[in-house]
Image (cartoon, rainbow, N blue to C red):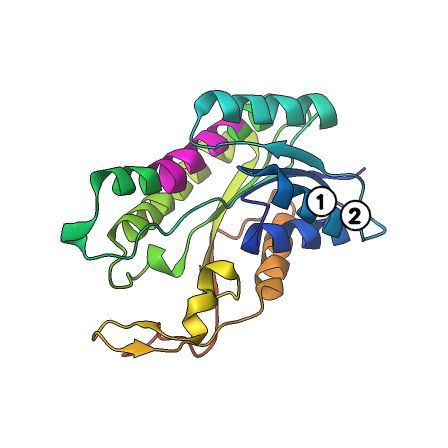
Amino acid sequence: MPQIAVVTGAGTGVGRAVAVELARAGWQLALAGRRAEPLHETAALAAEHPAASGAAVIPTDITDPAAVDALFAEVAERFGRIDLLFNNAGSFGPAVPVEELAVADWRAVVDLNLTGTFLCAQAAFRQMKGQRPQGGRIINNGSISAHVPRPHSVAYTATKHAVTGLTKSLSLDGRPYRIAVGQLDIGNAATDMTAAMSAGVRQADGRIAAEPTMDVADVARTVRHMAELPLEANVQFATVLATAMPYIGRG
């Protein structure tokens, strides 16, 4: 029987790559994101794999509690259960000095990266706790920024550190209900979001330097591995990054 996955931020980048990889493995998909058109593009890519069935495209603003409730209600009605939430949607926000960051921009990043991640996890948790057989898995997309900041990234870094605390709390609270919660911290996967890295991005010492990237498909395979473990096993935290990116050492 196919397993059911909800992927947020599924219209582009990491979310799209993960959705396609899960489709390759025969998962049934619910694709969530703000814009319908890129979600349909992802669904078309997923449908190219013989093991895949038609993906549900559900445009959703995950910062809106009512929209999140509607998303998970539609998934439950259509598929009957949820086996995986890949909690992926997020935004970097403006890359500006801290003193120049508008409060509205701070709140927008917090609303999406932290509150939206919580709302989706909460809705998935309710479904997984109540369904039979009980349980499921939540994988939160953290970031290298859950460990170390980049210059001019105060909102993004703060939210990704907070996601780590969310992951730990959900993992603890999910134990009695066979809900496994883990986090994948990603560094320099080649997507539209990281396109500027090949031209050069600001380093800790103020220099602008190009950084290596890795194929986003390698991230997708890592998520699939985490997702397909039995619920008795959990990858609590994993880091997948471009080998030569400035992270370990002096950078």
Q: Residue furthest right?
A: 50
Question: Which quadrant does the N terminus fall into?
Answer: top right
Q: Residue at x 32, y 44 (%)?
A: 162
The x and y percentages for residue 182 are 49, 47
Left or right, 30 with respect to 179, comes to right
Q: Residue at x 57, y 63 (%)?
A: 216
Tell me, for residue 5, which label it has, or none. none
Q: Residue furthest front?
A: 37
The x and y percentages for residue 203 are 28, 73
Residue 120 magenta:
yes
- Name which quarter of the figure residue 149 lies in: bottom left
Q: Which residue is mark 1?
A: 43
The x and y percentages for residue 240 are 49, 65
SS at mark 2 in the image: loop
User: As displayed, is residue 238 above or below residue 88?
Assistant: below
| Whether residue 8 can be seen here | yes
Q: Which residue is mark 2?
A: 47
Question: Which quadrant does the C terminus fall into?
Answer: bottom left
Q: Main secondary structure of the magenta part?
A: helix
Answer few, some or many: residues within 10 Å of disc 2's Cα (few below 14, many 20 plus, some between 14 and 19).
some
Count of all numbered marks drawn on residues in the image: 2
- Name which quarter of the figure residue 128 lies in: top right
Residue 174 magenta:
no
The x and y percentages for residue 107 are 28, 37
User: As displayed, is residue 144 above or below residue 8?
Assistant: below
The magenta segment is 111-123
| Whether residue 131 can be seen here | no
Answer few, some or many: residues within 10 Å of disc 1's Cα (few below 14, many 20 plus, some between 14 and 19).
many
Query: Answer yes or no: do the residues labelled 2 and 1 have beta carbons within 8 Å?
Result: yes
The amino acid type of the residue labelled 1 equals: Ala
